[in-house]
Amino acid sequence: MSAVRTEEFMVNMGPHHPSTHGVCRLLLTMDGEKVIKIEPYIGYLHRSIEKICENRTYHQCIPILDRFEYVTAMSCNYVFSLAAEKLAQIEVPERAEYLRVIMLELNRIASHLIFFGTTAMDLGALTPFLYALREREYIMDLFEMTCGQRLTYNYIRIGGVSRDIPAEFVPKCREAIKIIDQKVDEYMALLNGNPIWQKRTIGVGYLSPELAVAYGVSGPILRASGVDFDIRRDDPYSIYDRFDFEIPVRPNGDVFDRYMLRLDEIKQSVRIISQALDGLPEGEIKAKVPLKFKPPAGEVYSRIENSRGEMGVYILSDGTEKPVRVKTRGGSYNHLQVLPEFATDILIADLVAIFASFDIIMPEVDR
Amino acid sequence: MNLIPIVAVELQPIFAWIYRWLEGLGLQGTLLTVVVYAGLGVMVFGVLAVLALFLVWWERKIAGHMQQRFGPMRNGWHGWYQTMMDGLKLLQKEDVLVDTRDKVVFFWAPVICFVAAFLAYVVMPFGDGLIVADLNVGILYIMAVTTFTVISLLMAGWGSNNKYALLGGMRSAAQVVSYEVPMVASILTVILFTGSLSMVDIVESQSGLVFNWFVFRLPFGPVAFMIYITAATAEANRTPFDIPEAEQELVAGFNVEYSGMKFAMFFLAEFVNMFTVSAIAVTLFFGGWQGWEFIPSWIWFLGKTFMVVLLLMLFRWTYPRLRVDQLMEFAWKILIPIAFVNLIVAGWMKYAGWYW
């Protein structure tokens, strides 16, 4: 075989490619079907969200930050509100905290459902995507009922939430999470036992816990590698310490574990939501925050556990109406950096599976 | 009055009448034969083109209903002429050409693909007596001409001068060549019992009760059918073996640079190929056009074929896609050994006379 001269060639995967989920460009060096080098190029979706925030008041920042990670816009709302509340030391009413937790967890489920659908689609099974979106629709309806929006909510505000939930929200929400809980079992029945699915996912794309920690990987990917870390439990915010839920951890760190871990998380989110609905108190939904909100000078960093890992906002304030500096942190940025590490012995089909299992979305990377 | 609708045998007077009419025009000898066969060719082509259009629509409907939606609904009743409108749209589209293409190869690839897809129907028995030419090497001829498709896919991959297309073309070559082996082995199992390569003979050897269909000849019949249908899925480039065009990996694979009518030719050829492999499966394993006589034989043939097509469509919308190395592994390490063991067992049973 040595007489045959083979040549490496380079392939641009993206910015427009069906499985890069947005405008990510990966420059692949390939030897036939084998990927021997991956270079991610980013910046195609840069909208300078951080700079825009510097020229807006704190209240005005929230709708802009909706676009920071539009699949879980509630988290973006929340993490900024949390930082501003920390800075100004605002006490948030009890009911608002419960509503926030319900919305955050619903949004986490919606995000994981999208992950499930797109991952299955990237591995060639086109049907589960539609099933996942069907269940996500229940959540979108709930959000629309509450705040009138389906994607960028602008719902969680500094000091509370923008509106109270309508009367029919609670029964509809209970029904929705019940259906979703059942459907997750159906998803597992559809894919887990399938030999093709197992062959494509089990043992593919192993990420060692050391490497994951070294790159600052967080969220489901970190936990799928066996590192038991969840900000909801280890650095509690809001009222997460009041609920009884488990943090799913899986040891193998392959594509299958990353996929299963998210389905497990949906089940835990369902538990949190049902507890929060049971304990939902009456009362105010918003603390009194002036329209000319001026937090004291200082700096603050708040972080929450998003569906894509740690999401954080750093605010530097000089005591005026506008922040001096807003820095956002999204999990996908770190996850994209790990990708070149996988270019050891994988085929292009594995790369697609790994990329899908990382659940990277580009607005979080480029901001 | 005869209440039985026209069966294919009774279509023959019509053909005989046309034949006589042509003779009456003064056509004779070779010229007459050429005209008759050209006419038959046009007829088969027309039927298949309509079938392919129908299959595209049907697949979209099946996909839609499997995915909790309706599929095409706008054009006519449940969108029945949607594919025709799509075809018209593709005809009007600009034929985008890449400057770096290999002009000759790029042009001829879709043509060869399209022609090769239709060639197999020369020996396909659509019904009792409904066959263009009953070659005595029928199934061998089909195996030979359907492999032309892979040449066209390679040509498309090479001529596009695009890396994704090249990868797709290479994948399709590797895949089709590998899966040809178990496919032929399973077909040989059938031929062993019929003793003839002619498609008509194969069908007639399965006449009588349903249990005479080859798929029910235990134990080798069902095994041969399963191997055949797996290999046929790969031959027709359908999920879970659709790696040559694997959308999520290679964007569109070999046809990434094709647009307009050239793309439509690849697209229609894919559906015709799917119908071909299903029709072969019906002929070899499900008794071809045979069934109760009060239903015309060609309806039996089409009905059975559509059932096999339905099976392929259900595969496509259920399964994920295999990886390219796993695909090869599956062919060489699993399918081919089973196919050959099956062939040997069948041969031994034939020799010992343990069959009916």
Image: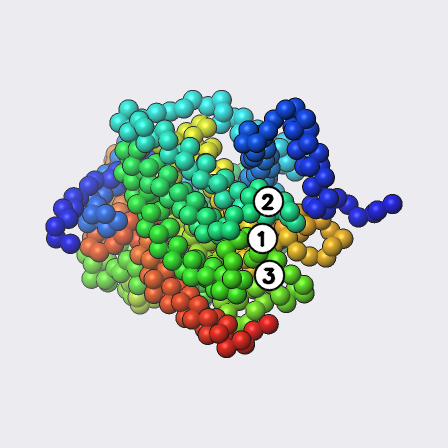
Q: In this view, does B109 lie to the left or right of B101?
A: right
Q: Where is residue B240 in the image (x, y as percent from the top left)?
A: 43, 53
Residue most extreme to the front: B29
Q: In which quarter of the image is residue B83?
A: top right
Q: Is residue B12 visible?
A: yes
Q: Hey, what amino acid is under mark 3?
A: Ser
Label 1 CA crowd tier, 10 Å (few <14, some 14–19, many 20+): many
Relative depth, front residue between A312 and B87: B87
Label 2 CA crowd tier, 10 Å (few <14, some 14–19, many 20+): some
What mark, if any, has residue B200 been given in the picture?
1
Q: Distance between the residues labelled 3 and 2?
A: 17 Å
| Residue picked out by circle 3 | B205
Q: How far apart are marks 1 and 2 (CA)?
A: 9 Å
Relative depth, front residue between A267 and A187: A187
Q: Earlier in the sequence, mark 3 or mark 2?
A: 2
Q: Position of residue B3 (x, y in %)?
A: 83, 47
| Residue picked out by circle 2 | B131
What mark, if any, has residue B151 been given in the picture?
none
Q: Hey, what amino acid is under mark 1?
A: Val
The disc numbered 2 marks a residue on which chain?
B
Give the tally of numbered discs. 3
Q: Which residue sits at x=12%, y=50%?
A: A3
The disc numbered 3 marks a residue on which chain?
B
Q: In which quarter of the image is residue B16?
A: top right
Q: Is residue B246 visible?
A: no
Circles 1 and 3: CB atoms closer than 8 Å: no
Circles 1 and 2: CB atoms closer than 8 Å: yes
Q: Which of marks 1 and 2 is nearer the N terminus?
A: 2
Q: Where is residue A47 in the image (x, y as percent from the top left)?
A: 31, 31
Say if labels 3 and 2 share a chain: yes
